[in-house]
Amino acid sequence: MKLHAHRDAALNTVTAYGTGWLEINARRYEHALLVQPEAPVEVWPPVRFEDLAPEHFEAIAARAPEVVLLGTGASQRFAHPRLVAALAARRIGVEAMDTGAACRTYNILMSEGRKVLAALLTP
């Protein structure tokens, strides 16, 4: 799905996504990503939802976002509380949703100036 919206070229924006890929600022990626408005886009190690481990969320917590949007692939799934404990300990909110919804929500929150991080598994 291609996303069309006014965007600030200085900020990371999800411009499209599809089965097996994500597009940030018109650059296609075929692996999981961590995306923040003003930080470099990073490859995120988990490939599937089942690969998620506490250390993946500890790395996110170190970035100190206000909220994390967890894109869980083609369907919405919820991470076990032990996985996101590092975020909860720092009072960082986590919202789990399918990756398409996470991409759209990220763009909205980012455009509002929120300190958001999208942890996206490919749909």
Image (tube, helix red, strand yellow):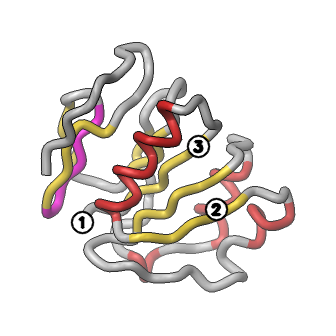
Question: As drawn, is 116 to the left or to the right of 46?
Answer: right
Q: Amino acid at mark 3?
A: Val
Q: Which residue is mark 2?
A: 57
Residue at 47 percent of width and 28 percent of height: 40
Q: Amino acid at mark 1?
A: Pro
Q: Are marks 2 and 3 in contact (CB under 8 Å)?
A: no
Q: Which mark is residue 67?
A: none
Mark 2 → mark 1, Cα distance in angstroms = 19 Å
Asked if residue 20 lies in the magenta stretch, the reply is yes
| Neighbours of disc 2 within 10 Å: few (<14), some (14-19), many (20+) | some
Sequence order check, earlier mark of 2 and 3: 2
Mark 2 → mark 3, Cα distance in angstroms = 14 Å
Q: SS class of the residue under badge 2?
A: helix
Q: Amino acid at mark 2?
A: Phe
Sequence order check, earlier mark of 1 and 3: 3
Q: SS class of the residue under badge 1?
A: loop
- Residue 26 vs 119, above or below: the answer is above
Q: Which residue is mark 3?
A: 116
Mark 1 → mark 3, Cα distance in angstroms = 20 Å
Residue 101, x across and y down, in percent: 35, 61
Question: As drawn, is 111 to the left or to the right of 99?
Answer: right
Q: Which residue is mark 1?
A: 123
- Which residue is at the front of the view, 104 or 52? 104
- Residue 3 vs 105, above or below: the answer is above
Residue 47, x across and y down, in percent: 34, 67
| Quarter of the picture holding the C terminus | bottom left
- Which residue is at the front of the view, 11 or 119? 11
- Residue 85 vs 38, above or below: the answer is below
